[in-house]
Amino acid sequence: MSQRFAGDVVIVTGASRGQGASHARRFAAEGARVVIADLLEEQGAALAGDLGGSAFAVRHDVTSEESWAGLLAHTEARFGAVTVLVNNAGVDLQRSIEETSLEDFRRIVEVNQTGTFLGIRAVIPSMRRAGGGSIINISSIGGIHNLARGRVAYVAAKHAVRGMTKVAAAELASDGIRVNSVHPGFVDTEMFREAQVPAERIAAVPLGRPAELDEISDLVLFLASADSAYITATEHLIDGGLSGGF
């Protein structure tokens, strides 16, 4: 395993399970010091234990300015200035527009959209101190194509993440901070399996299967690395070709 992230300090939100945990493991395996930020304290602590001294877990609410301030202070005290942020935390809601309450809508937007905004804003001073960095915002295929009937709040928030990514990239380029978004389709996580997606929907994916966790992490780590030094303000679909037949 390469050590291409030796010296990097990485925060991954929603990192206690699923895609976030996969990203955290991969960064740690390649030499990074990793902060596992999640509301799921026990799972986060268990993952940090697996990763050893290269990681620690923090209970973190992405919708709270105070929580972001505490996370950055704790991270800098323990590891130093942040060089990579993966805004991975997100929640879904399957409900028609008529059945979506204002409270439901606001909750989904708060986590997926506001949480991403607060994360971008919070890490800027730290990344400036580090001399630059990379922010990767996890959106969705639903942030590019409306393939998600029954997900009005989720799709609204994920489209917003795509837009915020471009604004942040333009504003922060002079600081050496790159900002990109990742737009997965189906991913083979526990949540995906529990959703029991109909076989015909999986069959619509040209590659014939959901993505493996490592395949999403490969893209995230590429965007965090020096290999993508000239890539910013871009969205990266990783959906097995599903959007190609849209």
Image: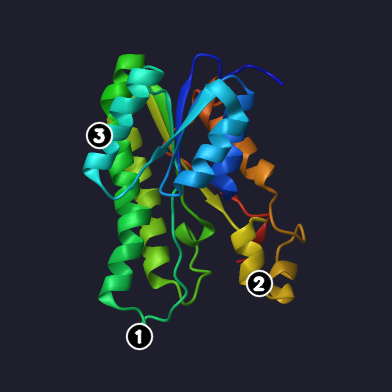
Compare marks 2 and 1 and give the one earlier in the sequence.
Answer: 1
Q: CA distance from mark 1 to mark 3?
A: 37 Å
Query: Is any part of residue 220 visible from this angle?
Result: no
Labelled disc at residue 69? 3
Q: Residue furthest left?
A: 66
Compare marks 1 and 3 and give the one earlier in the sequence.
Answer: 3
Q: Position of residue 114 (x, y in %)?
A: 29, 51
Question: Residue beneath label 2, please?
Answer: 197
Amino acid type of the residue that numbered disc 3 sits on in the rendered structure: Ala
Above or below residue 132? Residue 199 is below
**Number of the front mark, 1 or 3:** 3
Question: Residue beneath label 1, please?
Answer: 98
Of the pair 50 and 31, the residue shown nearer to us: 50
Amino acid type of the residue that numbered disc 2 sits on in the rendered structure: Val
Residue at point 39%, 72% (across, down): 152
Amino acid type of the residue that numbered disc 1 sits on in the rendered structure: Glu
Question: Which quadrant of the figure has residue 58?
Answer: top left
